[in-house]
Amino acid sequence: MLVIHKLVAKRIAASIAIGLYTVAMIQNSWADFTLNTTSVKTGTAASPYVINDNNLIHIQGNGYLRVINGDGSNGGHVQLNAPNGLIIIDNGGTVDASAQSLGGSGGSVQINGGTVVNNGRIWANGSGSGPGGQIFVNAGTFSQGATGDMSAYGGSQSAGLGGAIRVSASDTITVDGKMRTSGRTGTNPTYNGAANQISLIGNGVTIASSANLGALGGGSLTISSRNGITQNGTISVEGSGTTSGGFLTMNATSGNIDLNGLTTARGYQSSNGGHIVALANRGTVSVGSTGRLDANGGTNTSSSSVGRAGSVTLQGHHVSLTGNGTDVNVTANGGQSTLTGQAGQAGTITLQATAGDVTMTNAKLVASGRHGGNIDIEATGQIRLQGNGYVAANAANGQVGNGGTITLDASDIAITAHGAYETLVAEGTQNPLNAAGQGNGGSISLTASRTIDIDSTADNAGVKTAVMSVRGSNSDQAGNGGRIYLKAGTTLSFDEHQADAQFKRLLANANGGQAHQGNNGGGGLIQMSAGSMALNRAKLDASAGFNQTGTIADLAGDAGTVALRTADALALVNTTVTANASGSAGGGGQLLLESTHGDIVLTNTFAGLLSNAQSHLDVATGGNITQFGGELYARGVGIAGHGGNVTLAFGN
């Protein structure tokens, strides 16, 4: 404000030097409209109340401009026009076109100014069940301060149709304070357009850290910029008890999108989550350490009904997420009933770098629910997961459900594993409150046209968690293990760096679930392929589940499959590969180590199967097979256990 007034003073001083005529014109024009008292005016849609001044319109701290429709019910219609000048609404100043009586609709406020500054109140609210009105601002530059309040909500903020706020600026938009259009969705008869919508269109848009923008009740909130978007505050399209979360879209045709605040499209009570899209056509979408994006279903405290999650999509030339080590950056979790523990279906999270890299540093993505959700990470360049972050698409613990799907696709994939927990996890329900049913493990797929490089430094030698896990559910009908696929065009490598040289990190876990009746869950599938592959101090396990604690029955579970394939060299160092059956009747598994043209070198490596049914271990190469220590085996278990087959096929 102080800067603006200095500029005004300079303009007046410059005009004095021109001549008395110019001074008189500017001073009279500049003071044409200043309001510091209450003024009640009538304005209709056909004949709005209009204030014209090309230099200054100033609603001061004690100024209250009340515009009514003249029908005793609805809000009026007002225009403030200073297209080449300055429009200021001070802290405490008000422009009010709200309904006059219960059930009335909000009117309209239209502001056209070269520079528009709002530190006061601009209202076009409905009353009772009446719809909100509309507020349109067209400016060169628009700014709203921390005391600013712009609202066009439906009556009681939920009973009536929400209104509309549209701010369009040829230059920058800066928003602090409050901006609300909350209410029901549909077609608002006040202006014959979509209800409950906020739209900001500028050449650079900034949402301040204390700002709170909401199209609550499942409305739409759109931010469009020709020069980047910075979101440091709270913006929300949260649903209502009967309406899903809405649509929240940020689109920057140039520049970056920086997300450092709370951006939410969550459901409410039993409603579904909505949808969040951030699109930087030529820049980077960045989620900072304080940034949170949430498309969860609602939390229902009054019944067992639950909503499903929505979706979060981040797309730019580059995508970057930085975590703080505690909070989850992006969630698309199914709704939850606090009464029964039931959960709704998880949603979808998509990160897409169209001309560069996706980088996650200490960052966390979670899509958990009745069944796990879908998490898709794509980059034309590299995907980097570093620090103690993770990506989780698990089934929740309320009811038994299936794991979700995690997909990484890039030119190169580089993962630094979490030191204590899983890094990529899509498990069936592990600790169900209601154990009825079966939940199979999900799917994890990594595809790189060049390299996949995974490094781990476990926090201690007692760490038992896997880097990647798709375990089946521990339930009345135990779930089967899921699928883990890794495919690299050139090299695939894993190294464990824990100080205890005897420690091996569980790289891939596709175990079946644990049972207390019936059968244990069958092992899943682990399949890795590359031009060449080197695994150091790794464990791969596609075994069947085993009995839950306290269960002594002979419960069978079929072993799964592990297949490692290369075109050239395949080297396993201090590595364990297993696919064991459980129970005396568990089906045998399969292990395949295959190199089409190169050598297979096994150093202190144990690869084998345990079962009482026929199992198969095949080692096949067009080159040499070299074994230093370790063991290759296909053994039976128990006194009468039957062994399997170990087959070596080599070119030399």
Image: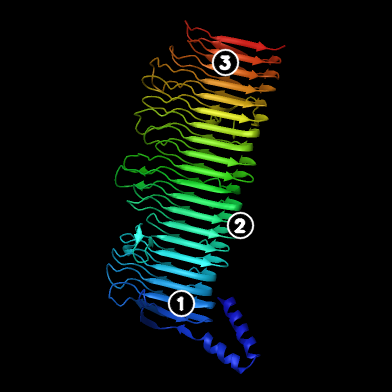
Question: Disc 3 or disc 1, which is closer to the eye?
Answer: 1
Q: Looking at the image, which residue is at 49% across and 47% down?
A: 312
**Residue 51 — which label?**
none
**Mark 1 falls on what kind of element?**
strand
Please name the residue that numbered disc 1 is placed on: 80
Looking at marks 3 and 1 on the same chain, the residue that comes earlier in the sequence is marked by: 1
**Mark 3 falls on what kind of element?**
strand
- Cβ–Cβ under 8 Å for marks 1 and 2: no
Please name the residue that numbered disc 3 is placed on: 608
Position of residue 453 in the picture relative to residue 374 (left or right): right
Q: Classify 483 as above or below 415.
A: above
Q: Residue furthest right?
A: 652
Looking at marks 1 and 2 on the same chain, the residue that comes earlier in the sequence is marked by: 1
**Residue 254 — which label?**
2
| Crowding near the residue tagged with mark 3, few <14, some 14–19, many ≥20 C-alpha atoms within 10 Å | many
Q: Residue furthest bottom?
A: 20
| Crowding near the residue tagged with mark 1, few <14, some 14–19, many ≥20 C-alpha atoms within 10 Å | some
> Residue 93 location in percent, x, y?
44, 77
The residues tagged by marks 1 and 2 sit, at their Cα atoms, a distance apart of: 31 Å
> Residue 156 is drawn in which quadrant?
bottom left
Identified by mark 2, the residue type is: Ser
Identified by mark 1, the residue type is: Leu
Q: Nearer the viewer, residue 339 or 549?
A: 339
Looking at marks 3 and 2 on the same chain, the residue that comes earlier in the sequence is marked by: 2
> Residue 284 location in percent, x, y?
61, 51
The residues tagged by marks 3 and 2 sit, at their Cα atoms, a distance apart of: 55 Å
Identified by mark 3, the residue type is: Gly
